[in-house]
Amino acid sequence: MRESKILKGMRAAVAHARGETKAARVTIVRMPDVKAIRLGLNMSQEEFARKFGFSLATLRGWEQKRRHPDGPARVLLTVIAREPKAVRELSLPRSRIGSTAWGFRHSRQTAHDARLTSRRATPIQP
């Protein structure tokens, strides 16, 4: 019987953990220190959350290490950390229900419809 890819991967992971192999790919994802970034900008949690479109509860979860930023949030936090002066000058639109902090509303389509139509977001009309 042929070994499944999942079982094969599990065996390779166990062998790597035991130090039996060295031919494994390891990806290390560095989590930004959200509190340090915010303090570096001299902003309160409320100001930081409002400025960059994060919910206050999410920001607090990140700072208390109960949660970790997902991909897009990690990217934004990295940009904020690397270019604090430039980012501080940004005038981002305020977040609204049904929209993102960037001022775009995502249409509510089925997955099938989304594949058939354009993937561009619709700008919110002021």
Image (cartoon, rainbow, N blue to C red):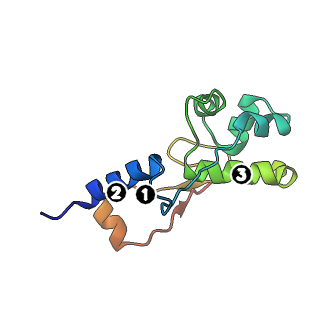
The earlier-in-sequence mark between 1 and 3 is 3
| Nearer to me, 9 or 16 | 16
Q: Which residue is mark 2?
A: 9
For badge 1, the amino acid type reads: Ser
Q: CA distance from mark 1 to mark 2?
A: 38 Å
Mark drawn on residue 107: 1
Establish if 42 lies above or below 99: above
Q: CA distance from mark 2 to mark 3?
A: 32 Å
Task: Report if residue 25 is visible in the image.
Answer: yes
Q: Is residue 5 left or right of residue 50?
A: left
Q: Is residue 34 left or right of residue 6?
A: right
Seen at 35% across and 70% down, the residue is: 115
Q: Quadrant of residue 52?
A: top right
Q: Which residue is mark 3?
A: 78
Which residue is outermost to the left?
1
The quadrant of the rendering that contains the C terminus is bottom right
